[in-house]
Amino acid sequence: MHLKQIIQEIEQQKELPRLRYQIKERTEAFTRGLFYTLFDSDTDVSSNLSRLGSEFEHLADLVCWEPEKPCKDLWSDYLQELPGILNKLNRDARAFLNNDPAANSLEEVYLSYPGFFAIAIYRLSHVLYKFGLPLVPRLMTEHAHRITGTDINPGAQIGDSFFIDHATGVVIGETAIIKDHVRIYQGVTLGALYVERAMRNTKRHPTIEDNVTIYANATILGGKTIIGKNSVIGGNAWLTASVPESSIVTHQPTINIKKYQ
């Protein structure tokens, strides 16, 4: 096959004319800029917000393909949300400090905790998700997923003072609801019982009420599954049904120990 024919075949099979990888790259740069604007003491808020506004307009032009829905107009609405998002994130950071005895300072939480970074990017993306901005919110949380190993869909609803310890392997689905003062450890999945496309517009993921602790590698599935407030879900538990408030759920594995000959 000659080079000209190879080029023609590749061009013919590029089926998505709007698939531009610069969308991904620009979204990641925009996300980093937001994080610095909110937290870095050396970053000037005024000038950085102006720059981010321009970056957002470029992104909106790339992802909003319907002329009657000018997404770049969302920037002014998003700006109004940023102080409230920062307030929530500061409460999240204090939850890390209060729940992890290994945390020595708030600075350590902001700079080094992958769980906090994942929550921060989730909160920044969730508002854009609610505004209906295409693609960008998911790319923001996937950027955090790649860095932290924590996969939080931007559609999830998460309350105040959320704590994810160690972070690696945590999965929180699109229709999950997590209320206030919830603590989650590594490897926890809040997922769906089924993944059929027909369930797209239904609640597929569980609800976690206030002040629940979910320990490592627990799996909680189903849109009708509710974990009652003040409950503790032990490590490796597998739940597909609701749990009353103030419950303790444990998983008891069988462990056999033999003397090595």
Image: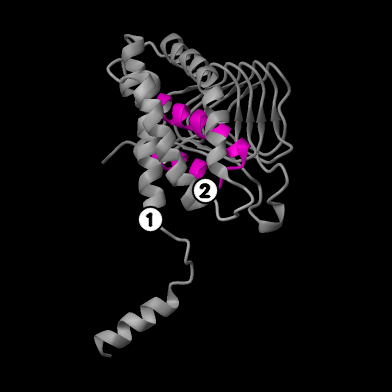
Per the rendered image, the range of residues in magenta is 116-143
Q: Is residue 52 above or below residue 183?
A: below
- Image quarter (top left, top right, bottom left or bottom right) of the N terminus: bottom left
Judging depth in this view, the residue of 182 and 246 nearest the camera is 182
Q: What's the mark number on residue 138? A: none
> Is residue 27 rendered to the left or right of residue 188?
left
- Looking at the picture, how far across and down is residue 10, in whole percent? 37, 77
- Looking at the picture, how far across and down is residue 118, in whole percent? 43, 31
Helix, strand or loop at label 2? It is loop
Residue 167's quadrant in the figure? Answer: top left
Q: Is residue 83 above or below residue 132?
A: above
Q: Residue at x 36, y 17 (%)?
A: 109
Dot 2 alpha-carbon crowd within 10 angstroms: few under 14, some 14 to 19, many 20 or more: some
Q: Residue at x 40, y 29 (%)?
A: 50
Residue identifier under label 1? 21
Residue identifier under label 2? 135
Q: CA distance from mark 2 to mark 1?
A: 12 Å
